[in-house]
Amino acid sequence: MIFKTFTNNAKFLMLSAALTATTLTFAQEAEEETTPKFSISGTVDAYFRGNLNAPNVGENTMAPGSSFANLPGFALGMANVVAAYEGEKVGFVADLVFGPRGTDAIFNSPMYSATGNIVNQLYMYWNVSDKVTLTMGNFNTFLGYEVISPVANFNYSTSYLFSYGPFSHTGIKADFALSEDFSAMLGIFNPTDLTEYNPTGIYAFGAQLGYKGQFLNLLTDSGAYELDYTGGFSITENFYLGLNGAIYDNDGVGFSGVALYPQLTTSDTFAIGLRGEYFVESGAYGAIDQTDSGVADSSVFALTLTGSASIGNLILKPEIRIDNGSDESFLDTKFAPQKSLSSFVLAAVYAF
């Protein structure tokens, strides 16, 4: 605050100077308390992947029908850089990705911008009150147990439920803190995974109801719908059980599945976890079937055992995965159809 005075009264000048100094001091302290905090965080990851009972070279290299960690040999994940500006009332997040994992995560970009293929999230938020927050822009989906960031998942490879999407939404949503235990969300978005703009004029609608870390999610999009439950429970101090179940239907074509995530922490630096997933396609989805046999309905039971060892900010994740399909969806080492695929992954993830 600036005071201007034009008086010859010396006492008044001295008093004005004292008041000004005091006001500026309090203003500076208040500004320090409310100044938004800028931060940069993210991850870098790479991995080695090899099949144990299927080809590792050539055009018929086999991999699970899920997203990420599907390249043979030593492979790159992505560099993920997240810039955030967090204020008491407003702020933003700019989440950028570079590398194969990032490309797979935002596969429908660029639609318009030449740099759209590096934008994982880009949104602004407004804390209207202690109980209401509005968010507008592009943000990762509220559906499902797993996420795009490798450091936020226990398993390095991802589930079928996660891989069948959606990955992200562009639109506006309102989050409500209904009470200490209950929360809710309502949103309107572009069609699923159309991140840069809406070329269709059709919009999707989302809703979420949360209770003590358990979430029931609904997304409707162009006549299709997905109903999803995501949650988990701390059975003991060191044992956690995560849960995810979903059903998607688009006029008889869709999928459904359930996944369990038991995880045991054995020390401050090591944990081990298992993902058991049963996933079913309906209609002509056909993504599970990598041999193009034309099977309309397929199912898969997948077990993924992952260790997680921390060395400072570096996390090493050795992983054994077995995918067993209802049909001969994979090829063996002699390129003959088979129902199962066994693979090994060793991943390194650095978080900053």
Image (spheres, rainbow, N blue to C red):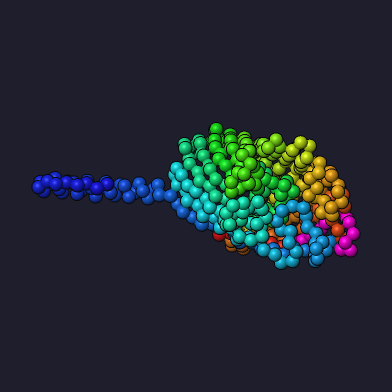
Q: How many marks?
A: 0
Q: Residue furthest left?
A: 8
Q: Position of residue 172 (x, y in %)?
A: 55, 40
**Range of the magenta residues?**
333-345
The residue at the point 47 percent across, 47 percent down is 91
Magenta stretch: residue 336 in it?
yes
Q: In the shown orientation, is residue 129 left or right of residue 261? A: left
The residue at the point 74 percent across, 66 percent down is 73
Residue in front for this viewpoint, 330 or 294: 294
Residue in front for this viewpoint, 155 or 310: 155
Q: In the shown orientation, is residue 97 left or right of residue 19? A: right
Quadrant assignment for the C terminus: bottom right
Snapshot quadrant of residue 104: bottom right
Residue 280 visible at all: no
Q: Position of residue 280 (x, y in %)?
A: 80, 43
Residue in front for this viewpoint, 265 or 36: 36
Snapshot quadrant of residue 266: bottom right
Residue in front for this viewpoint, 131 or 271: 131
Magenta stretch: residue 320 in it?
no
Q: Position of residue 147 (x, y in %)?
A: 65, 50
Q: In the shown orientation, is residue 94 left or right of residue 303? A: left
Residue 200 visible at all: yes
Q: Residue furthest top?
A: 178
The residue at the point 27 percent across, 46 percent down is 1
Q: Position of residue 178 (x, y in %)?
A: 55, 32
Magenta stretch, main secondary structure, is strand
Determine whether 204 is above or below 307 in the image: above
